[in-house]
Image: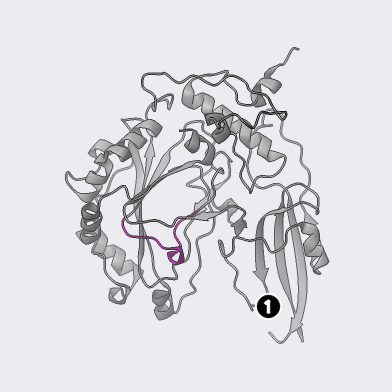
Amino acid sequence: MAEFASSGCLFFDELIDEQTNKEFLDDIGHTNIDEVDSVQDFYKNIKATSSIPRIPAGTPLKEAFPKNSPLDKIFKNEVVEGAITSLVGSNTIVDHQFLHITFPTKYFNQANQRQMSQANHQDSTIDPRSTFDVQLFYFPTEVTKEMGGTRYHPGTHLRIVNENAIAKYQNILGQKSIVCKPGTIGIFHSGLWHGAGVNFSENIRYMFKVRLQPTEKQELLWDPEKKYQPLPNRALFWTDETKDQTINDILMRSYPWQEADTNRLDKINVVKFWRLLTGHKKMDVDYWLTRIENELY
Amino acid sequence: MAKRQKVLVLYLKFPSLEAEVISWATFDGTGKKLHMTGDTDTPPYPTGLDALLDGWRLFQASQAIPEHPGEEFRTSYLKHEFFFEKLEEGDF
């Protein structure tokens, strides 16, 4: 949870088994690029023949997918279920889902179209809530570096921006792109900045996404016995480097893209986020909030 | 000979051209190179000053705007934005 609070993302490599990945790919009619005449027809065919249902926004996740379908199996995986329960609770509802398909260079050459990456953005509109949604990503095939897997910027999830208004940042120091084995699951805080890369490989790249919304306060959903206790204050600046790393080191991690001044506000916002996730309203890390909450007038 | 503008946008670690580059974008009006999101993980220059030393002309820098009262801890867009240009002559 500290990793999620700090970076805004979690990854579970090769979590979904080979058989389920195959069932998912068979279900959507995965084929090679030579068989694809147009993006529109490819999507139309998947929508007409696959088991991926139309889910009205606000449908409970438990009722969203046909029983024993590949997606039902994925969401019943105990790690997926545990992560979802920890982040958005056991009564989460579906906002929307989409099968993102990124076509390789060959398709753009045949169609005489310019092949461009997707600009950086934050889904889906300006969102000043303390509550957060999550976006779960499922990669049914291997994603190699040249396939241009989802680009993301760890630690950006608490910056409040207006969707595509961050498109002007072509490159951001510390940017990462997903490279993974088949069956990998990624979970993003809904505020995390991201965008799709360009697929320079020979193969089609798939990413199935579901956005989930909580229906309850996201306080200690990950610790139902309520055992979490914040760590005591530690020395600042004149520190003891021999001490083991603690959860506070994860929470206070800096990211390469952060400005020198705003980096401190980013840390303050992680502490505020951790207060919400733990229910400890006065807890602090490295005195960031205690220092400025000591108002005596 | 025609003239075309190349634009370089640098976002710096703090509001001085000596600061390190943390984000960047390039738009090439000569049409020689198509830049796009995510095309490189390494900044074109270590600092804003290095861009000046390489002949880029600064034409816009972000202002220092005080935080709105009550919103002092709200974080949003990258703050320290600098626009540079180079003019290139050629047959385009």
- Can residue A60 be seen here? The reply is no
Please check the rendered image and state whether residue A142 is part of the magenta-colored stretch, yes or no: yes
Quadrant hosting residue A200: bottom left
Query: Which residue is painted at 47% across and 46% down in the image?
Result: A124
Please check the rendered image and state whether residue A108 is part of the magenta-colored stretch, yes or no: no
The residue indicated by pointer 1 is B30
- Can residue A32 be seen here? The reply is yes
The one of B34 and A241 positioned closer to us in this rendering: A241
Element on which disc 1 rests = loop
Horizontal arrangement in the rendering, residue A262 relative to residue A66 (left or right):
right
Query: Which residue is painted at 73% across and 53% down in the image?
Result: B20
A251 in relation to A153, above or below:
above
Quadrant hosting residue A266: top right
Residue A85 location in percent, x, y? 34, 32
Residue A189 location in percent, x, y? 46, 41
Quadrant hosting residue B70: top right
